[in-house]
Image: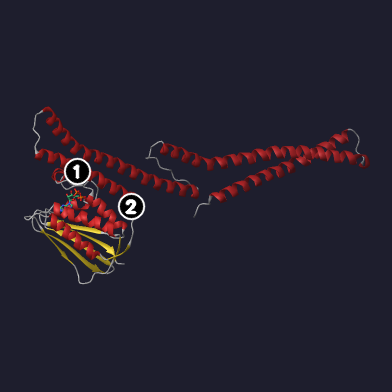
Amino acid sequence: MSKPSLGTRLFISHLLVMIVGLGCFAIAAKVSSPRMFVLRLEQLEKRGLFTVRSARTYLVDGFNIAWNIGALWSLVLGATAAGGISYVASKRIMKPLKQMKQIVQQFAAGDLGERMPESEIPELNQLGVSFNSMASSLGDVETRRRDLISDLTHELRTPLTVMRGYLEELADGKIEGSPELYLRLVRETRRLERLISDLQQLSQAEAGYLSINLQAVNLMPLLKSLVERFQDQLLEEGPTIKLIYPKELPPALADIDRTEQILVNLLGNAVRYTKTGSITVKAEKANNQIWIEVKDTGIGIAHEDLPYIFERFWRADRSRCSNSGGTGIGLAIVRRLVELQGGKIQVSSILGKGSVFRFCLPTA
Ligand code: ADP
């Protein structure tokens, strides 16, 4: 059976107070008035005043007095009982509200572990449930914020320590400056720059600030120009890169700049983690979606690592990838950008054999 609402409760408690008040009044008046009246009549009789004519005024007086005394008693009793009930009722309603106020204050003071207890009043219960779910999501945000800061300090510290080490040794004259050394220092500063720009993109994408301008776009020119761009960067002994596409590819409903960003990140990874072999970019239409695949024959990703690769700062092997300049943020950005455009991303990989990243975008 559903519990009565707060409105019904308030109405019933007021009705109860009124009924009790009036009831007390009626009972007290009923019990005391005749007794008072009889008492008055007896007083009159004793004084020998009891003839009907002369008694009229006295009788009326007597009734008046009896009624006044009775009414006074009723008033006192009724008011006490009604006040008592009102007090108890308001206390029962106020108790959970006070509790809530206290919890909210604790929350504001940073104690995010507090939760609202269940209440027998449905409205307050709903409020408590909403508050608790808000508290959980705030708690998650807080945990993610802490994780981000600790990951970030770690990521920033590594290149800074390397640079400081070299610079100190240079200053002490322990090592001599050489082009390789300076290039190493430049690489570390580049790493810092990349980290900061990746972070900026990620925070924009995660916080939803990133504007997504969806429109019908033909993806072919973009794919062709990107493949050409990456081809130019590849060394002779490195992997080859090719593009496979159907005769006709319908336009996608996408943001061209964000799609380019996704592809640059996926192709960048493919190039970074593929020493020899091939990188294939494939576009195809399936149902109402356009799937784009970036396949490489590189180092691959272990099966147990696959669930984590889209998490920020996650890298298969921290030392290996930090040497290669990876920040572990690229794929987190990719996933967010794909989702913001209404698509999804999948990965499959075999360690030592290569990886396949596929994402889809809706057709226009
Ligand atoms: P990073 O900047 O380190 O490449 P990403 O978020 O792009 O960061 O990738 C996360 C991790 O996933 C990488 O550090 C790497 O270990 C792994 N990874 C991503 N793409 C590939 C790939 N094509 N082949 C092998 N490993 C990959």
Crowding near the residue tagged with mark 2, few <14, some 14–19, many ≥20 C-alpha atoms within 10 Å? some
The residue nearer to you, when weighing 88 against 344, is 344
Q: Position of residue 186 (x, y in %)?
A: 16, 41
Q: Position of residue 79 (x, y in %)?
A: 67, 39
Secondary structure category for the residue under label 1: helix
Is 62 on the left or on the right of 72, as rendered?
A: right
Q: Position of residue 235 (x, y in %)?
A: 9, 54
Q: Residue 191: which disc?
A: 1
- Where is mark 2, residue-wise? 210
Going by the numbered disc 1, the residue's amino acid type is Arg
Residue 339's quadrant in the figure?
A: bottom left
Which residue is most to the top?
Answer: 172
The residue nearer to you, when weighing 242 against 15, is 242
Q: Residue 323: which disc?
A: none
Residue at x 23% of width, y 71% of height: 248
Residue 252's quadrant in the figure?
A: bottom left
Going by the numbered disc 2, the residue's amino acid type is Leu
Secondary structure category for the residue under label 2: loop
- Is 208 located above or below residue 35 in the figure? below
